[in-house]
Amino acid sequence: MSDILKNQKQKKVVEAFLNYNRNKFKAAESIGMPRTTFRRFLDKAFNNPVFKDLLKSNTPDLNKDTKVEDINIGPNRQVITSSHKIRTLKELIHYCKIDLNIWDIKKHVINSWGSATNKSFQVKVWLSEKDNKLTIEDIKKEFKDYSTKYSPVYKDIKYDIAKTGNAAEIAIHDLHFGSLCWSKETGANYDIKIAEEMFMDAVYDLYNKIKPFSPEEIIFPIGSDFFNVNSKLNITANNTYQDEDCRWQKTFIYGRRMVVSGVDVLSKLAPVKLVVIPGNHDEERSFYLGDSLESWYRLSKNVTVDNTPTPRKYWDWGDCLIGFTHGSDEVKGTLPIIMATEVPKMWSVSKFREWHTGHLHHKATKSYDYATEQNGIRERILPSLASTDSWHKKKGYSGLRSAEAYIWNKKSGNEARLSHYPLKYDK
């Protein structure tokens, strides 16, 4: 190798070494050079008159009796100083220019020896490189910051809707997006691709079915075990392990995109109100989803998002009052009194009161009649599109998969219940 080429290599190594505060590991990594090769070029640079002065001028002003050992092993690092002057961890960090934005302190030890008038100190510190991987909180903040700055611009839609007094509710509960089921074990295959197709099929079908009723508003509950798990550990909010289809980042991103696609379809017919309901599988994740959707639609007058951190949400439409909850936490039989206690004003002016819950994946209806039918409360346990997973299959729990829509009239209450069945996936 020619002297010019050697000097060019050594210059590259020296610049990286100085730019990364004399950290050989980070410097070698920054220029894509093996550490053994990097050290060989650096040793030669110290003896090269071209770079000797540059390296000396950038060397810490160490006392003659000070020794510094800096050992890198993978993501771990050990720094040892032996000196009369460096006596504390703080002095070592300052003296050796250790960047605490890059390194975490695992432990340190201070030894001393000698007489009171001539004492020497050895300071050892063990470091580990910080984990700079993104967390769900980082992704949430990044998406919110990005979407706040670059939220898509939705044109205001002038809806040509007759004053029918009707509103539509789209009920696609307990989707368990991300769940993985194998047909030979559970009776039907299920993954994020199938879940997305089923979700969008339901949206289009229910859109066409509610359209003749000319709804003035569409209420669309989201959450309630929309996601199958709550974290990257593939566990629920109650720490129950689940079979998952893919990486947690992909599940979250694809799930959010899917909801946006569905809402954009529905908002062509009428203004959409999204209410986010936490589930026992996705309590935290559903909140992050709601926060993302709130940022996404911040500039839209056609879509509103209610992501308030309450376990139950309420929606009133004329004489109708509907409560939404996942249904996994409330004590059996207490939903009527909960409604009357939490929203007494809405309760007092309503005639048609219902609770819509999920959790059990099958359809059922309960009535609570305290005086007359007009003052009664109905609880609807809504069905799910999700396939039966291995645990439910073992227990013998199953139901007819479906999604539903309800037509609510301001004066006459529930006018219609419309169903969508994913029959092509049951073959």
Image (cartoon, grey):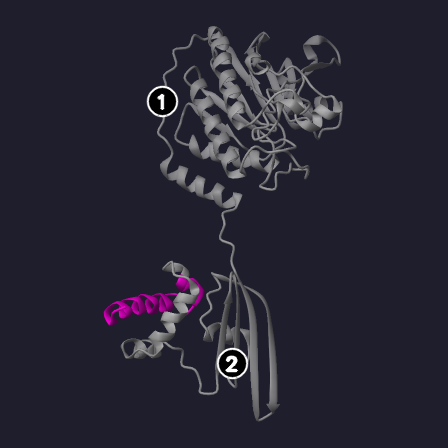
Q: Is residue 407 magenta?
A: no
The front one of 163 and 238 is 238
Q: Residue at x 70, y 28 (%)?
A: 391
The quarter of the image holding the C terminus is top right
Percent of width and height locating residue 399: 67, 17
Assess disc 1: are there few (<14), some (14-19) or many (≥20) residues with their C-alpha within 10 Å of its C-alpha: few
**Which of the 4 image quarters holds residue 361?**
top right
Percent of width and height locating residue 381: 67, 18
Q: Which residue is mark 1?
A: 156
Amino acid type, callout 2: Ile
Q: Residue at x 44, y 16 (%)?
A: 270
Element marked by disc 1: loop
Q: Is residue 10 magenta?
A: yes
Q: Is residue 55 left or right of residue 310?
A: left
Element marked by disc 2: loop
The front one of 149 and 396 is 396
- Mark positioned earlier in the residue sequence (2 or 1): 2
Q: Which residue is mark 2?
A: 86
Q: Residue at x 56, y 83 (%)?
A: 121
Q: Is residue 243 left or right of residue 82?
A: right
Amino acid type, callout 1: Asp
Assess disc 2: are there few (<14), some (14-19) or many (≥20) residues with their C-alpha within 10 Å of its C-alpha: some
Percent of width and height locating residue 359: 67, 25
The quarter of the image holding the N terminus is bottom left
Q: Is residue 296 left or right of residue 316?
A: left
Q: Is residue 105 above or below residue 306?
A: below
Q: Residue at x 36, y 60 (%)?
A: 31
Q: What is the spatial separation of the Cα atoms under label 2 and label 1, in whole angstroms?
A: 67 Å
Give the extent of the magenta segment: 1-28
**Which of the 4 image quarters holds residue 163?**
top left
Q: Is residue 47 left or right of residue 323?
A: left
